[in-house]
Amino acid sequence: MRIVFILVGLICIVSIVLCIPQANAQVDVFVYTETTQWIGQAAAQAEADILIGMITGKNGIGKVVNEGAGALEEWTQNHTKKKENHIIVLFGDIPPVIYPQGNAKPEGSIAEEYLDAGNTFANTADYMFWGLQNRNAEGGLQNMMDIPGILQWDDDTPMKVTPEGKKFTPTLKDYAVDRPFHVDQLANDWELEIAFATNTGEAEGSTRCDPCILRNTKTEARLIQAYQTANQDDPKGEVLAEIILNYYIEAVGAQAVDPAKKLPTLWGDIKSRR
């Protein structure tokens, strides 16, 4: 009878585990502040410290790193794994160690391979992937997204907080952005996943957004931008943290229950009832 009970218990455990959503690995985050653009290095570090303080140790967040370009190169290569949803946070500059300057490697750079594996870049301050002193210019974003012609112009474009922005980013208020994402230029499997502020105050029908998340439906790559503004005193770190904690972690499944961790608990419960 005892053997029968154990067998029934094992069957129950397997059935329950199969019904539990598989958890993604925790999201590791690299915050890069060694070089910055449209924000001073000290100001960038202050915002980075706010971001790091808010996300470190939170559910779904793995190791948070704030180091220089040399460490970033190795970290990016080590995190180039399929759909693990890790995040690199930039403050207006992408260093040449992961994206060679002057668009010297438009295809197959360390940065692009990391992104195409289903990971994420987040950027604040200057134009995404532009690079210091125009080292990549428009080509940086165009090559990383494989969308020729996509741009991020329009100084002082009014942004209105969307209903999603009010829900997930309570710190965010209406403001003017200098380098919004051009939603109407998205192509090649890229779509607007969520907009926290747009030129209309709604995601549907908008043509510009910031903050927002763009997602590639084929690779699961994501681009997060927040406050791409010129030396403007915005709550960059706080809003980025709200995006990551209140939306991103759940969206990528990092908060799902891990069956491997649940199994011992379930088996212990069954044994205690014998």
Image (tube, grey):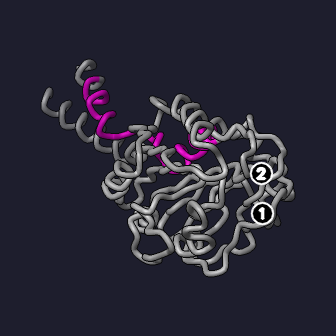
Q: Alpha-carbon neighbours of circle 1 within 10 Å: few (<14), some, or many (≥20)?
A: many
Magenta-colored segment: predominant secondary structure: helix
- SS at mark 2 in the image: strand
Residue 240, placed above or below residue 228: above
Q: Secondary structure at mark 1?
A: strand
Q: Residue at x 67, y 73 (%)?
A: 186
Task: Specify the amino acid type for callout 2.
Answer: Ala
Question: Whole-percent x and y of residue 28?
Answer: 41, 44
* Quadrant of the frame with the N terminus: top left
| Residue located beneath label 2 in the image | 197
Comparing 65 with 190, the one in front is 65
Magenta range = 240-268
Q: In the rendered view, does 201 fall on the left or right side of 144?
A: right
Q: Which mark is residue 217?
A: none
Quadrant showing the C terminus: top left
- Tell me residue 90's x, y (percent): 54, 51
Residue type indicated by callout 1: Arg
Label 2 crowd (10 A; few <14 / some 14-19 / many >=20): many
Please identify the residue farthest to the front as the structure is shown. Answer: 133
Which residue is painted at 67% across and 75% down in the image? 150
Q: Residue at the spot x=47%, y=31% of the render?
A: 56
Name which residue lies at 81% across and 60% down. Answer: 155
Q: Residue tagged by mark 1?
A: 208
Where, by quadrant of the figure, is residue 178 drawn? bottom right
Q: Report how far apart the C-alphas of labels 2 and 1 lie in the structure.
A: 9 Å
Badge 2 or badge 1: first in the primary sequence: 2
Left or right of 189, for residue 236: right
Per the image, is 178 magenta?
Answer: no
Taking the image as shown, residue 260 lies to the left or right of residue 83, namely: left
The percent coordinates of residue 60 (x first, y second) are: 46, 38
